[in-house]
Image: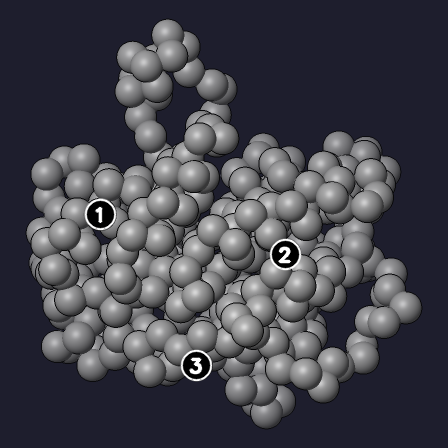
Amino acid sequence: MAHANETSELRPTRRAFLAGAVAAGLTSGSAAASPGMGRQNPQPLPQVTIAGVTIPRMIVGCNPIGGWSHMSRYMTMAMTEYFTLERTVEFLSRCESLGLNVWLTYWDEKPRKALRALWEKGSRIRPYFLGTLEETGSISKDVLDFKPIWHVHHGNATDTLFRAGKQEQVHDFVKKVHDVLGIPAGISAHNPDCIKYAEDKGWECDLYQCCLYYVTRPHEEIRAKLGAAPLGEPFLDADRDAMLNVIRQVKKPCLAFKILGAGRLCESDYAVEEAFAYALRGIKKSDAIIVGMWPRFKDEITENIGYLRKYGKLA
């Protein structure tokens, strides 16, 4: 089953103006173009090859497009209001024109329509999806209609199944992606112990997708350690190093995501750059990052590509 989801100047910030945006009724339009916007850099972006597929070291994420803000109900509403089908196609076209031609997306009508619209225009953007096994234990072949470069087990489901002692269902997914779909397979997780387990057991994963923050950690576990728990999802600063350590230890290539803490490291341009630098310096040379973008207030695409070029070079 394919699933829905499952990063200077101090102003303007990337995602911090939600309240002002809602209050002011900023529901249309997009960020003004920067002076260099639209000019394609002739130099290719840093690239890696994973499971025989060469990709840029930055994959376009889908959480802003799908409205998974990991912030608040109003942030989610603002994101989904902005990312109409037309704007989604426009956004992805611009990403591709600048060299970002791989999109991690979710299984729903809007992204499927966006992909068809892009391909009708001659786009060569390459998607992949997160998924799980069906309740019967089988795996759906529907994703093959969209020629995914690989198929990855959904991170929330991975964490939940491991916690329930049902990790072999995740392993079965990997094997069935290979045997039934005939494409590379991976697992996504927020808990670094899941990644370590799969590596130690020698699972046939082609890649791992690793969240830099263990946001699915049970609150009772946090209370046991700290005596209290945060409101909402737990973004703990120590989690980043814990996952980066695992990423460096495992031999398989990894895709690091939530490098910006779902907007929590976006309070200034300096903070964004530091987050990119920290993530790209902390992963292996065979690894890449996934970054969701919401270009409502600024040209995040060009900005992020600049950080990728600066800190993601392999030479």
Task: Tell me the CA gap for discs 1 and 2.
Answer: 29 Å
At 43% from the left and 81% from the top, the residue drawn is 54
22 vs 175: above or below: above
Badge number at residue 196: 1
Badge number at residue 293: 2
Task: Tell me the CA gap for discs 1 and 3.
Answer: 25 Å
Could you say which is closer to the camera, residue 310 or residue 129? 310
Closest to the camera, between mark 3 and mark 2, is 3
Closest to the camera, between mark 1 and mark 2, is 1
Q: Residues within 10 Å of mark 1 (few under 14, many from 20)?
A: some
Image coords of residue 169 (percent x, y): 12, 53
Give amino acid for label 1.
Lys
Image coords of residue 199 (percent x, y): 18, 55
Badge number at residue 273: none
User: In the rendered image, which quarter is residue 190 located in?
Assistant: top left
Residue 131 visible? The answer is no
Q: Quadrant of the N terminus?
A: bottom left
